[in-house]
Amino acid sequence: MPKKLLQGNEAIVMAAEVAGLKFFAGYPITPASEIIHALVNKKHIKVLQMEDEIASINAIIGASLAGLKAMTATSGPGFSLMQESIGLAHMMEVPLVIVNVQRVGPSTGMPTLPAQGDILQCIHGSHGDYFPIVFYPNSVSELYQYTIAAFNAAEESMSPVILLSDGYISHLYETIIPHRDFTIKARSRPPLGTGNRHFTGLSHEDSVPKTSDVDNYRRLITRFREKQQVTAQRYNFYEYMECSKETDTLLISCGALSRIAYYFKNDFALYRPIRMFPLVEEIKIIAARYKRILIMEMNMGQYAQEIERILHREVEFIPILGGRIDLKEIKQKIYGQK
Amino acid sequence: MDKNSHFKRYLKLDLLPTAWCPGCGNGIALKTICQAFDELDLPKQGTVVVSGIGCSGRSAGFFDLDSVHSVHGRAIPVAEGIKYANDALNVVVVSGDGDLLGIGGNHLLHAIRRNTNITVICYANEIYGMTGGQVSPITPHSTKTLTTPNGNPDYPADVQSLFKHHNSFFARTTAYHLDHMKKCFLEALKFKGFSFVEARTMCIVNYGRRLGYKNSNEMLMHYKEFYKINDYTEELAQNEIGIINRCL
């Protein structure tokens, strides 16, 4: 397999094609637009530029129900607009892949600069309880690899899977070997037009809306949660590097920022979640070996609070805000805290 | 009557009666849609109904077909996704005026522009009925509703004008004019391209009774007296129902 020089967003497209993508609907937004630019040239993928992100997510829900593997790609502002229908896709159990190339927010923020501010929005953006599977790679070759994983996890869990990226790694060029020897999950549900099923956002049982059956609702949500956890077990992705020296500190980071964390591998043990949600359970065992947990992320502590929640202990947190990833500054912040 | 050659074959009869109020016009439109399906002998496998949210939104669940009950205002993009994914399917949207023209108005605008080959049937009752009776995008000027206690200060949206410069299909009909309603549905379903039928249905419980109508029959009689049929025209006057087909 020859090496290829690819941009992060291009790698997502190449992988999506391998994973069986047949339908894409999206709306232009920095820094995700390269995805739709690359897709319009693919002969066997139907691509629609919709009027907004709300239409985009709903169009891919329709296309997925109609039998095609479907994806959309956006950034924070568009991801915010999609939230209501992400809930719908969970309720109707529609497999989708949603790529969110994060930029600095809130609101229009700084469109060309990377951030990690949408981490909690992935799991709490829509109303009600739902349990999405979220991946966050940190290189071009990983974007390729985990785009394929996202499509497979979507089919297995029958739910929308979120592939997080950021303005840095999506715009990064790296050489990758685009392997094609992945197991690709086939569609498991017969397409629309083959039965008399009713897909609804209402609480339901066997195609019949049940708007006041409390016990049925509890069963439904429990089943959703269990289904997501079972699927997630098969996608237990994380990176853990023990330190060559004795250390009492575990440094946690993800996405673009985790690339700079490798500079500290001689001082700290490193942990990087790739499956962001549901949280990888192994973190409990790994963290137990270290007195001090240090988390740096490009937001005000979104993942740190999730780590605290799962570990039941306090962690130290270093915010790297505004999209500037500067080694000198980060060194100062990390060693300054000692 | 043979159940297989009857409009009832398109309905999940065990889910009836509907949850709609006594006197509601939605049931008339639902039955007429099924009659139009029956007359065209649309295959049950290969036809999909999509709806949004509201009283009308519950229609999709009554069809004995694959159906999707999406979120508020988004029935059209869901239907477009289905149609562009599988062109062989007959895709029909059934929803209300608040859903299609209010929260979903932007999608309507662009579906007309794209001329997606789907049929949209709008139960136009001029009110947000399910939430108690708030003003809708086509509530007439000066009409009192829960949110316009001094009368609607705005004027209703001129829906047909959106279709003016496109090769698409617009029709307006009412729940009183049953033959005309069926004709509109039939032609809309046969139309190759985007077709839209504004079917006036009465809401007595959260609209009509506050305007002085004693029962829903009086609202039907109003349709009878107020609306004149004017098919195959270029533009419908306020008191006209009819078909505007720019591909004839």
Image: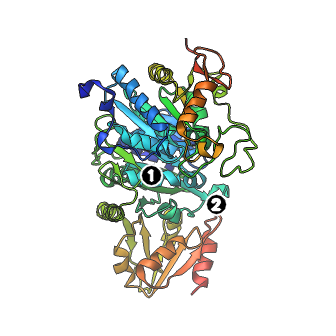
For the residue carrying disc 1, how many other residues have a C-alpha within 10 Å: few (<14), some (14-19), or many (20+)?
many
Residue A89: x %, y % from top left: 42, 51
Quadrant where the N terminus of chain A sits is top left
Residue A319: x %, y % from top left: 60, 73
Three-letter code for the amino acid on which mark 2 is drawn: Gly
Q: Are marks 1 and 2 on the same chain?
A: yes
Report whether residue B24 is seen: yes
Q: Nearer the viewer, residue B136 or A312?
A: B136
Question: Which residue position is annotated with label 2?
Answer: A105
Mark 2 chain: A
A251 lies left or right of A325: left
Residue A259: x %, y % from top left: 50, 65
For label 2, the SS is loop
Q: Earlier in the sequence, mark 1 or mark 2?
A: 1
Does A286 sit above or below residue A9?
Answer: below
Q: Splitting the image into 4 quarters, where does residue A66 fall?
A: top left
Does A9 sit above or below residue A240?
Answer: above
Q: CA distance from mark 1 to mark 2?
A: 25 Å
Mark 1 chain: A
Residue found 45% across the figure and 33% down from its top: B28
